[in-house]
Image: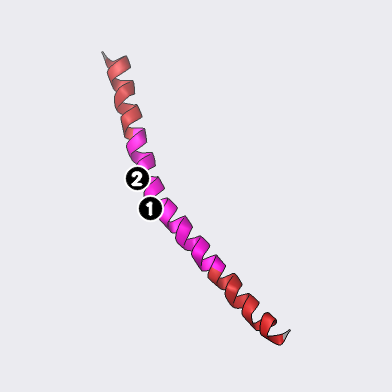
Amino acid sequence: MANLAKRSPRRGLGGFLETSKEVSLLMLWGIPTFISAYQVLKIRYTVVWGS
């Protein structure tokens, strides 16, 4: 029982670190994608309504 109690916080911390890595990767990929999609939509909007 003592070994299990010692291991579980480490496992929880490891899981938390893995989750934060995934979140940071998602943000690294997601933010530029969102910006480029916004720019494309803005260009299309300008082309459709500007002419």
Number of callouts in the render?
A: 2
Q: Amino acid at mark 1?
A: Leu
Query: Which residue is labeled 1 in the image?
Result: 28
**Residue 16 spot, x, y in % from top left:** 55, 66
Would you place residue 15 above or below residue 50 in this image? below
Give the overall secondary structure of the magenta segment: helix
- Say which residue appears at 36% left-offset and 35% top-offset: 37
**Quadrant location of residue 32?**
top left
Residue span colored magenta: 15-38
Q: Which quarter of the figure is the C terminus placed in? A: top left
Q: With 21 as the anchor, is 42 left or right in this view? A: left
Q: Amino acid at mark 2?
A: Pro
Front residue of 38/9: it is 9
Question: Marks 1 and 2: in contact by CB < 8 Å?
Answer: yes
- Say which residue appears at 28% left-offset and 19% top-offset: 47
Q: CA distance from mark 2 to mark 1?
A: 7 Å
**Residue 10 spot, x, y in % from top left:** 58, 77
Q: Report the disc number at residue 10.
A: none
Q: Is residue 34 magenta?
A: yes
Query: Which residue is labeled 2 in the image?
Result: 32
Would you place residue 12 above or below residue 38 in this image? below
Q: Which quarter of the figure is the N terminus placed in? A: bottom right
